[in-house]
Image: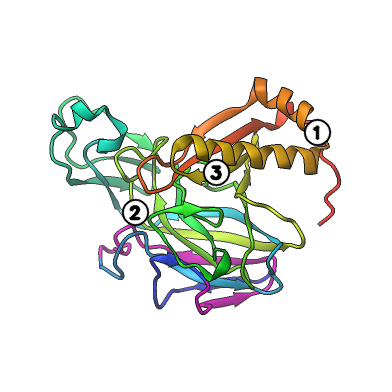
Amino acid sequence: MVLHRFTPQTYHNVLGTLPPALRIASGDTVLTETIDAIGNDKDGVRRASGPNPMNGPIFIEGAEPGDALRVEIVRMTPISSTGWTRSVAAANVVDPETVRTLPPRENVTWRIDRQALTTQLQNPPAGLEYLVLPLAPMIGCFGVAPSLGQAISTATSGEHGGNMDYRLFGPGTTVWFPVSAEGARFFLGDCHAVQGDGEIVGTGIETSFEVEVTLTVEKDRKLTWPRGETAEDIFAVGNARPLDQALQHATTEMLGWLREDYGLDATAASHLLGQVVRYDVGNVFDPAYTMACRVAKKWLPAKRQASF
């Protein structure tokens, strides 16, 4: 395994089959610093424009369409003393008649204590003076080049990943993406210090991180949608609008996973999911919504020996 320190010279607002910024071998680790969702670096200097400027693409040798790219999120270290969010719930997450009663939306600052690993509003509104949150780092937008030579905006998401804003995409999680282009071409950015389910104000606490990921090609592992694993759970992710279609994609991917790796037929998998599944909302703000179909490992049968 080789550790690559990657300092981007340019940033991208699409995920696509772009010229590689870095080439690595399968199994190598990359250490890089991200900028925030509007392009500010750790010192508040504007380095790029939004939405969600990405580091990359990183070309992984040997990755071909039909493979999977395994992304192990090893570490996320905050490197800025501030972050920001929008101040008011988005119009599409409240009843239509409530929209006109909402105050104007603005960006507000959160102070980040990098020693205590906490954050709080710089100027809290009345009633929130007590609120100090532990950091829960997560990657808001990451993935691989889409199929058919597409270049898809970092404002949205699809089978390739993208702007999913799912809070379990943090340190200790392993994520798999379906490879659709030579080298996979991995992109990474839009990191959050904290975010609730749904990203309902249109942001997490947007800030800069030093991120360490290990990227490994798994040959002939055909996925349709991203998959993930934590110490406690496995989950499959669907991205679409309306929300029920995202749920359908995630459930279909999980049924396939339970068949391939755990030997459950459709009936057995349905019995299992019917009683133990948990659905998490990733993003309900951007053009495509995100749903995760999650199962606790304690309910799974023994895993089959991997064939890839």
Q: Position of residue 250 (x, y in %)?
A: 59, 40
> Could you tell me the amino acid type at mark 3?
Gly
Q: Mark 2 — residue?
A: 207
The secondary element bearing badge 3 is classed as: strand
Q: Where is residue 239 in the image (x, y as percent from the top left)?
A: 50, 46
Q: Position of residue 82 (x, y in %)?
A: 28, 51
- The Cα–Cα distance between marks 3 and 1, rounded to whole angstroms, is 21 Å
> Could you tell me the amino acid type at mark 2?
Thr
> Could you tell me the amino acid type at mark 1?
Leu
The answer to whether 126 is drawn above or below residue 35 in the figure is: above
Q: Which mark is residue 238?
A: 3
Q: Within the magenta stretch, is there residue 84? A: no
Q: Mark 1 — residue?
A: 264
- The Cα–Cα distance between marks 2 and 3, rounded to whole angstroms, is 26 Å
Q: Earlier in the sequence, mark 2 or mark 3?
A: 2
Give left or right: position of 76 versus 294.
left
Q: Earlier in the sequence, mark 3 or mark 1?
A: 3
The answer to whether 254 is drawn above or below residue 9 in the figure is: above
Q: Position of residue 294 (x, y in %)?
A: 61, 34
User: In the image shown, does 113 or 167 lie closer to the viewer?
Assistant: 167
Give left or right: position of 266 versus 75.
right
Q: Within the magenta stretch, is there residue 42? A: yes
